[in-house]
Every structure is written in structure tokens, then in C-alpha cells.
Image (cartoon, helix red, strand yellow):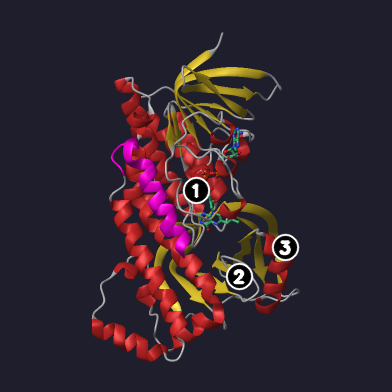
Amino acid sequence: MTETFDVIVIGAGPAGVSSALSCRREGLNVLLIDKKKREDIGEKVCGEAISKKTSHRFSEKVNVEPPLENEINANIEVLALRTLLPIDHITLPAVGYMINRHLYGQRLLKDALQSGVKLFSETKALKPIIQKNKVSGVIVRSSKNEEKELLSSMVIDCSGVLAAIRTNLPKDFEPLLDKELTKADYASCYREIIKLDKEHDLKGKIVLQYEEDIPEPGYIWFFADGDRKVNCGTGFIKEEKNLDKGVKSVYFKAMEKYYPKGTYDTIDGRGGCVPIRPPLWNSVAPGLIIAGDAAYHPDPLTAEGHGPALIAGCFAGEIAKEAIVNKRFETKDLWKYNELIFSDFGSKHVRRRILTIALNKLGPKKLEFLLKRKVVKQEDLTSEGILKKRSIFSYLGIALRCFPRYNLLLLMKKAIDISKKTNILCKNYPKSPNNFLEWRDEMEKLYRKI
Ligand SMILES: Cc1cc2nc3c(=O)[nH]c(=O)nc-3n(C[C@H](O)[C@H](O)[C@H](O)COP(=O)(O)OP(=O)(O)OC[C@H]3O[C@@H](n4cnc5c(N)ncnc54)[C@H](O)[C@@H]3O)c2cc1C
């Protein structure tokens, strides 16, 4: 007999466990599916930094303990941006944790199972089931290699970068939903956890070190993971102009400058992939909500996607509950999910993408010039700072300090203007799908201008 659930959540990463917990807290009957073995759930190649504020906000929303002592490898205080030299030119507050993702993920999974969520591990979602123009379940391959149909009122796709449900929808199903994966929207990464032969000077810091020959977004990261441990890595968008560059060789070349071979032991080294664009402009379709990497939720500047995935999962649970109670599953009935995303981290992530593009266009040398001359100040690089109003005198001062490189000033002005316009657009996210296409066209036009 075909099994039926209120909600089937695909993927038990942060977005999936959060969605499942949130749905369960709303009293729904939830099935969580992951292709991994149960004991491997939560494990992932990652920079492992998570914001304290976001992780605690998530804990309050679904009533679970925030990261526990044994799940935290180190505390973080600041995000430092470095350009030509290993000196912090810019430090932005970034209070958070370096987290053991596996332990934290396993604990959240346990919380979800204790609350009554059902888990099918070692079960791969193959494609959605569409009935009466609505996603009504999934076809899965079980651990015994059997194909099964599982039915539900709602499906939440939290399957990570490959977006197993979204990308396997029929092309003509909900034209407002983007079903493609585009190479330009992802960075291919290589990450290591290293143990140095002496203490490092990165305590409390996550550092983005910009390098001339690392393609967009252009940095190698060093995250302090303990007194001698560092989580480091790089990644970039694979484009025609850099197809010959291997991520691993770019990484090792940059590492040689800061931590030469022989000064550390590698504890773990693996590749991964992270979205590097603003959130999907629309993440719902009849019977379907998309959360986490499957909906491009990471911060495009820092690749922090763990926190946004947890928050998006909470929103997905709230909206799924509403749909099930009202028995209304059309795109317009789930639309509020998009509004929640764009009024929360979505708007900031649009601005962060613009900032990443601008920083990359400048490159480390020009950025160094702008920072040394105080044309760009620390506060200007926060996503809120970019929106602040400036007086005519402040513009004059900036122009004088920028002499004679006014082309850099023009690029900055353009980035600021576009950021302000996208912020207004995000605030005016359409209240229903009716005006969505105009909104999306305007956003994409702006976003491409930079
Ligand atoms: C190199 C690198 C560094 C990063 N650094 C950071 C960082 O420092 N801080 C941060 O916050 N974020 C970081 N991120 C991003 C972060 O890891 C992700 O944003 C986050 O894990 C997204 O959560 P998710 O639940 O959407 O997806 P995932 O964590 O990828 O989980 C998806 C789950 O779905 C399962 N799945 C996939 N397909 C199927 C299928 N067909 N059927 C069943 N199950 C399926 C997978 O097994 C997995 O368990 C980094 C990412 C990378 C690659």
C-alpha cells in the first residue's frame, strides 16, 4: 500500500531537519528522507562557521537547545577582510561558533525523531509525483534498491545544491519556478582542516584573504578552529575563462604563501560546492516549498548557508502547516514563504552578491588603494552600511581621497546605487504571484548591471 504523510521533507541537512522539526512542532505527520546512512547525517564539507544570533533564533523557534559545548570547536568574534598583506584591513562583527557539523546535525536529527518525525535513511528521492498539477509525493529508491511511491499533501525540497525535486519537475510545471541549475550560480570548492606545528594568530577570527589569481569570489578563507587548527579553503565560479584552473591547485598555490607545506598536518581535505547568488526569486510551486542550498540560501559573500537553511526550514514548516489546515496548496497559497525569505536574509543576500561582484571587479590591489585612502571604510562594507545616506560634503571628501582613480569611485557608486534599488525592490516583494514576473525582470536587470 502507498504510504501517505502530511509532509515529506527531502534531505536531512540543516534545512531538512529544521523543516521537519518545524512541521512536527505544528502537529503535522512528517517523513524525512535522506540518501545517507543515519549515522552519517549532518556530516558535510564546510567552513563550519555559524552565527550565534541565527543558531539561537532557530533554537527558540523550534524549541531545541542552541549549539552545546561539545558541538563547538571555537568561538568567533569577527570576520576579517584582507587584501595584499595578511593584515586585517576590515573587521566586521561576526559573533558565532566554529561548529562540529556532524555532532550538531546528529543531535538535531535526534530531537526531530524524538518529536515524532519518521526517518527513511539510505533512501534517495528520484523525482516528484505530480497529480492534478500539484506535487503530491515522491518516487524514491530505498536501501533495498526498491522503487517506491510515497504520497503527501506537501513536499519540502531540502536536498542541497542539486535540488533533486526542483530540477526534476516537468518543464511546464509552474512556469514561475526556475528549474535549472546554472554553473555561474555555484562555486566549486576545496577545503582542508589543518593542524599547524605552532599556534596561529587567528583566534576568534574568520578571515577572507583576497588573492589576485583566485577567480570570483576571489579569496582563500582561514577560519580559526582551535589554537592550532584552521579550516581553510577556496572556491570559485567555473567560467569559460578559468576552466583550465583546478580548484585544488589554486588552493595549494595560495596556501604556500601563508602556510607552506611541511608546517602543518592535514586532518581532512575534500571538495564541495556552494551556491553564490541571491535566493531563488520564487521558491514555491503547487504542493512544493524549497529551502536551503536547493533554493540558493547561503550568503554569497561568506558562503554561510547553515544559519539561513535553519531559518528557511522554520518558515517552510509554518507555511506548510497553513496550507494543510486550509487545504490550499497552489503557488498563491504558499507565496508568503517568498515574502518571509526576502524580508529576512534574502534582501541582505542580494546586496552581498552585489558587493562580492564589486569587490571582485576591483581586485585586491585596487581595494587596497581604496582602503588605505579611506575612500571605503569598514562600515561601508556591511550590507546595512552600503544603504546609508551620505551628505554632499562626505561625497566631496571621498572624491578628493580617491584622486586620481575616479573610475574606482564610479564603480563604487554604481554598486551602492544598485544595492539601494534592490533593497527597495525586496521591501516591495509582490504580495501575490500576479506581479512577480515584472518584479523578477526588474531585479534581474538591476543585478546584471553590475
Ligand atoms: C566548502 C564549503 C564551505 C562552506 N562553509 C560554510 C560556513 O563556513 N558556514 C556556513 O554556514 N555554511 C557554509 N557552507 C554552506 C553550507 O554547508 C550549506 O549552505 C548548508 O549545509 C545547506 O544546508 P542544506 O540543508 O540546504 O543542504 P545540505 O547540508 O547539503 O543537506 C542536503 C541533504 O540532502 C541529502 N540529499 C541530497 N540529495 C538527496 C536525494 N536525492 N534524496 C535524498 N536525500 C538527498 C544529502 O544527503 C544531505 O544530507 C559551506 C559549503 C561548502 C561547500
21 sits to left or right of 202: left
Q: Which mark is residue 248?
A: 3
Which residue is disc 1 drawn over?
Answer: 296
The earlier-in-sequence mark between 1 and 2 is 2
Callout 2–callout 3 Cβ contact below 8 Å: no
Work out whether mark 2 precedes mark 3 in sequence or the reverse, and give the earlier one.
2
Quarter residue 282 falls in: top left
Q: CA distance from mark 1 to mark 3?
A: 24 Å
Asked whether residue 96 appears in the rendered view, the answer is: no
Q: What kind of residue is marked 2? A: Arg
Circle 2 SS class: loop
Report the residue marked by disc 2: 228
* Element class at badge 3: helix
| Bounds of the magenta segment | 430-450
Residue plotted at (69% across, 55% down): 270
Viewer-side label of 1, 2? 1
